[in-house]
Image (cartoon, rainbow, N blue to C red):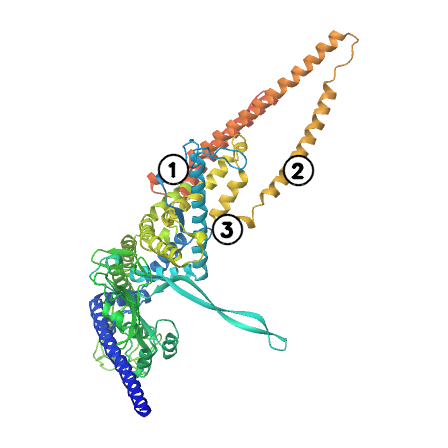
Amino acid sequence: MQESNEFDQYYEEQDASEQEAQAERDMGERLKVFGTRLRAKADDQVKRRFSIEERWLDDLRQFNGQYDKTTAATLAASGGSKLFVNITRNKVNAAEARLIDILFPTDDRNWGVQPTPVPYLSKLAKDQEPVNNENGSPFVTEKGVQVQNRDVAQGVMEEARERSEAMQDEIDDQLTETNYNSVNRDMVHDAVLYGTGIIKGPVILGKTRQKWSEVADEQGRVAQVMEVIDDLKPGAERVDPWDFFPDMQARKIDDAEFVFQRHYMSKKALRELADKPGFLRQQIAEVLRQDTDNTQTATHLQEMQSMAGITSLDNGRFEVWEYHGPVEKEDLIACGCDVDEDDVFSDFSGVVWFSEGHVLKAVINPADTGEMPYSVFNWEKDDTTLFGVGIPHLMRSSQKVLNATWRMLMDNAGLSVGPQTVINSHVVRPADGNWRLTPHKIWELTDKNGNVNNVFGSFEINSHMTELISLFQYARQIADEETALPQISQGEQGSATDTASGMTMLMNSANTMLRRVVKNYDDDITRPFIKRMYDWNMQFSPKEEVKGDFSVDARGTSSLLVKEQQAANLMALMNIAASPLLEPLTNTAALYRKVVSSMQIEADEIVKTTEEIELETQKLEQQMQAQQEMMMQASQQQAQPTPTGDPLAEQKLALDAQKMQMDGQIKGAQIQAQAQKLQVEQQKMASDRELELAKMAAEKGIKVSEMRTKLGIEQMKVQSKDTLFEKEQALKMRMGSGI
């Protein structure tokens, strides 16, 4: 009987083991089908994006100053010039640098977090009605002050403000730790070059740090042991446009139903995935068993390697795909996800990793909002697709005209630099056997009856350098127009005005295009990304003091509009505030700090602190007070009346002395006021003169410096006449007659 039980138990264990193995095989088959279906969907998106990749390759060749293979072969066969005038790289680099300076100021962030406005609280903040307890008695503070409705509203608003500042500092610290600005600079380069830049986030990024701690053994001996601690924070990640395959039917990222992202991973990186939570080790092992020699290098990588002069080799990398989008419930269950099997109404948004048809990971979207972690920024939007166009594409035709003109210019220069010579070889031959023309060359006569005068003929090729140079310059102007990036925005002043006001107007005009681009960045990157960071902290952050109902404020556009004019306006305000009339009304130290900050210089390193300024002011006031007291004592001693013995006379003299002193003070104040008025008028006249100079220069089509030079000559003539007149008058005063 006991043997029968043992046999039954043995067969039950065998059945359970077989059932478990069969379940694993069934799950593997379902995952294989799921992975194959996702791979087919990804391949379909790759085919749909082929034409855009062809455009990107043209952009990349143009940026690197290289012709495509067909054009290069045609130029080589023609035997002419093969030069490439790379204006595109300069345009791309200038636009990228200009945009980065605007988007990422050194003294401030281009975003903020503000409490969500509540109209009820704003109205309640003006209500002076007292607050009562539940029993109807007035609510009084510990100091005996009766609380009003406005006090409660102000308290709630103050707490919301403090929490919003805490959330802002928390997000700022997270982005700083994960090099947010550096990631964005790489993304901006993609947007300017290809027309499309992609930011992914929040993604959990981590770095390890070492920590030494004391550990005691059983005998009480203490030793220092190093620990490796993972410091994980949410941050941003730049996505290569070549590896980004969204729903190609969508025209905006918000309309995309799904997104595929491609990763190229080595065996080492793939093994590290097996240790991360949520990844299926058995599936990763199946991928690792495959031969990487069969993995093909992406077409764009081969082209980029060819442009760099590198022979394309097999990369030995696995192609791993990351999918964000809708996932069927059965597929999630097959991957081991905790899903309510009886729920037939929920639409699941998931994240799936797969490679070579094997699903490596599948989870439900961890964000409660269900959003995909991608933001797309375009330099120039395309209404037909979410992929935009960049500067190389905008100036493609102009770059071709520049190249063709430059090649013609070089070819014409080579032909016109010397004449074409025709030699009658039947009459003469070179003594050295070389037909090349050289100085002091000896020729032998082969036909005694031939006419030596008709042996050589010289023909000049006309030079068209002037026309070609004009065409080249015109093509450069067209490139400026097509890209909306004039030379002044690239750091070249050209024929710009020399006055500060004129330069400000030109810079504002040059930034018109950038204002639109910065606004697109605010709408497409800053606001949605910071909003996702805010949502992540609300969902996962353990810090309750940072949580609240907040809104995101994108400041890129305001930074451009304000700071582009701020420096010039501050300098003009410094000149105005220096007048004696306005100086007492101006906080000079604060104004100077603003001037230094507008120059992107740390003000604390240059400007004295408030305490230091107060000490210096006190010392100056004490010195001036001591000098005034000394002057008053000397004035009183001089104005002291001489005693006459008559009290009435002495009193009258004293009153007269006081009146004279008061009259002198009033007259001095009037003189000072007139001087201040005169100084203000002079400053106004100087400003008006600069504006008139700019208008006159614009009307005559010359530079302000040239106009100022001409006016300076006329002014010297007038001054010389005035000086001669003054000398003649002085001579009449001394001698009784003039010149």
The three-letter amino acid code for the residue at tag 3 is: Ile
Where disc 1 sits, the SS reads: helix
Residue reaching furthest to the bottom: 3
Residue 473 image point, x, y percent: 30, 55
Q: Earlier in the sequence, mark 2 or mark 1?
A: 1
The three-letter amino acid code for the residue at tag 2 is: Lys
Residue 444 image point, x, y percent: 28, 81
Q: CA distance from mark 1 to mark 3?
A: 38 Å
- Read off the residue under disc 2: 619
> Of 68 and 257, which appears nearest the observer?
257
Q: Is residue 236 above or below residue 357?
A: above
Q: Earlier in the sequence, mark 1 or mark 3?
A: 1
- Read off the residue under disc 3: 601
Tell me, for residue 383, which label it has, or none.
none
> Of 450 and 178, which appears nearest the observer?
178
Of the two numbered discs 2 and 1 in the rendering, the one whose residue sits closer to the viewer: 1
